[in-house]
């Protein structure tokens, strides 16, 4: 799939996608007769994530033969305003066939000395003779009626041509994105075999028997655990005394939280207490949480209060999923807190997502350097996090007939080698009655 940014862009991109092959590498070469349009195209390439690299020495040396002394063979290759059909023909024929070049954009500014149709024919002839049908080309002519006619001719002859350098580069970006999506779709997903789908389904069945569609954190974590996801040790206490026993078993400090299918956002209800250090703290927290929950929603069905290990400080991230009506199970990744809530710095993939692909997702977001170790901070355990993301994507894919949406918010990520801990988990089941 390739995305278009507007209706016109949809037509521009479709033109390229229908006439040209995908661009499988990211070495784009630009040939131009004008420095100005060359600079515009360079900026566009940067904007569309195919930044231009200098052409290798041998390419530069050969192209130098088809331009005056003051031309430039770097990239964009500037044949200068003196360029006629012959220079265009020779440089295009050579460049498109060179192994370094993955795609070619040819720019032309109409001049008094040259005829646009002649230039168009030179370009088309060069592409035909080079005979490399797996390499894409786009063209932009900037000029008047003659240029417009030449571009119509190019399109009729299978070469996408546009009246703006930006559009020609955007066309190459579309062909590049298309190649990337195809490679992505072809990538195999190696299932994690150490998962217990049956156990996960039995938990869902139990939940269906007593509640509606909202699974509590304790129930959700049971499913996460069945899929080998590293959740913080969590147990449900139905009484204050039981909470004390569990806290001693788990070890102080502990966190305590309200468990109710009617209270999804626990802290909003005053239902989360952290850093509880001793028995007195547990007893006080138990009463306080219960009272807050009653005040928040008098008729809430309260399962009890969860006691869990308090995870040490680390970088907070968020995983999420929805079963999209069009794309099916889809996963989301972002950094926690303001990054998601205010900056909307998140990335999505259709599940399942391999561990390799998950690692790429971690680099998709603007805040990626925070995980990579910015400003002297130690790098975070991206490897462990990418495995968690991949497992999570398998979980929501396997259970997509039951799970409508889910999240793990937050997941705490530690320094390289120290792994990650999921401290909160939430699953919302599908509405079977509505189906
Ligand atoms: P909510 O339902 O409000 O999202 P959470 O379980 O996410 O409740 O708890 C709120 C916050 O408390 C979390 O964002 C996290 O910062 C902190 N927290 C929750 N559980 C733990 C834990 N086990 N260890 C450390 N911090 C925790
Ligand atoms: Mg949460």
Image (tube, rainbow, N blue to C red):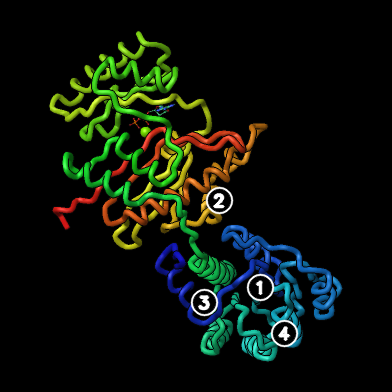
At horizontal 51% and vertical 77% (from top left) the residue drawn is 16
306 vs 213, left or right, is: right
Q: Classify mark 3 as within 8 Å of ligand 2 or not, answering yes or no.
A: no
Q: Identify whether 227 is placed above or below 103.
A: above
Q: What element carries label 3?
A: helix
Residue at mark 4 to residue at mark 1: CA–CA distance: 14 Å
Q: What element carries label 1?
A: loop
**Residue holding disc 2:** 359
User: Which mark, residue 148?
Assistant: none
Residue at mark 4 to residue at mark 3: CA–CA distance: 20 Å
State whether residue 119 appears in this view. Answer: no
Which mark sits nearer the N-terminus, 3 or 1? 3
Q: Position of residue 279 (x, y in %)?
A: 36, 11
Q: What element carries label 2?
A: helix
Which mark sits nearer the N-terminus, 4 or 3? 3
Q: Which of 201 and 347 is in front in this view?
A: 201
User: Which mark, residue 102?
Assistant: 1
Q: Which of 356 and 331 is in front in this view?
A: 356
**Residue holding disc 4:** 93
Residue at mark 4 to residue at mark 2: CA–CA distance: 39 Å
Q: Classify mark 2 as within 8 Å of ligand 2 or not, answering yes or no.
A: no
Camera-side mark, 3 or 1: 1
């Amino acid at each position: 799939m390739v995305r278009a940014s507007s209706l016109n862009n949809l037509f521009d991109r479709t033109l390229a996608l229908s006439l040209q092959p995908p661009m499988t590498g990211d070495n784009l070469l630009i040939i131009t007769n004008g420095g100005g349009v060359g600079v515009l195209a360079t900026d566009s390439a940067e904007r569309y994530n195919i930044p231009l690299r200098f052409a290798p020495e041998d390419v530069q040396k050969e192209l130098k033969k088809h331009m005056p002394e003051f031309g430039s063979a770097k990239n964009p290759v500037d044949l200068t305003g003196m360029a006629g059909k012959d220079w265009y023909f020779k440089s295009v024929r050579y460049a498109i066939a060179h192994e370094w070049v993955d795609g070619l954009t040819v720019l032309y500014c109409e001049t008094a000395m040259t005829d646009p149709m002649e230039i168009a024919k030179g370009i088309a002839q060069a592409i035909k003779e080079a005979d490399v049908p797996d390499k894409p080309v786009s063209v932009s002519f900037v000029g008047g009626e003659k240029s417009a006619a030449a571009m119509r001719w190019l399109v009729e002859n299978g070469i996408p041509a546009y009246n703006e350098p930006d559009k020609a580069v955007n066309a190459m970006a579309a062909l590049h994105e298309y190649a990337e999506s195809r490679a992505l779709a072809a990538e195999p997903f190696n299932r994690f075999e150490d998962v217990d789908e049956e156990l996960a389904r039995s938990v869902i069945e139990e939940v269906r028997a007593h509640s509606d569609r909202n699974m509590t954190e304790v129930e959700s974590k049971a499913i996460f655990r069945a899929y080998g996801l590293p959740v913080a040790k969590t147990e449900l206490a139905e009484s204050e005394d039981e909470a004390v026993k569990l806290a001693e078993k788990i070890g102080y400090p502990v966190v305590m939280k309200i468990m109710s299918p009617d209270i999804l956002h626990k802290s909003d209800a005053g239902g989360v207490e952290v850093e509880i250090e001793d028995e007195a703290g547990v007893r006080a927290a138990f009463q306080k949480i219960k009272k807050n929950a009653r005040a928040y929603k008098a008729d809430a069905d309260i399962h009890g209060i969860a006691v869990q290990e308090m995870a040490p400080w680390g970088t907070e991230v968020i995983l999420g999923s929805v079963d999209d009506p069009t794309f099916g199970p889809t996963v989301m990744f972002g950094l926690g807190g303001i990054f998601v809530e205010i900056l909307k710095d998140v990335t999505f993939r259709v599940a399942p997502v391999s561990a390799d692909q998950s690692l790429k997702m971690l680099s998709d977001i603007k805040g990626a350097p925070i995980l990579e170790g910015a400003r002297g901070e130690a790098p975070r355990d991206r490897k462990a996090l990418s495995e968690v993301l991949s497992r999570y994507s398998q979980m929501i894919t396997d259970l997509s007939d039951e799970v409508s949406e889910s999240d793990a918010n937050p997941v705490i990520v530690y320094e390289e080698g120290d792994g990650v801990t999921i401290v909160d988990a939430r699953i919302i089941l599908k509405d079977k009655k509505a189906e």
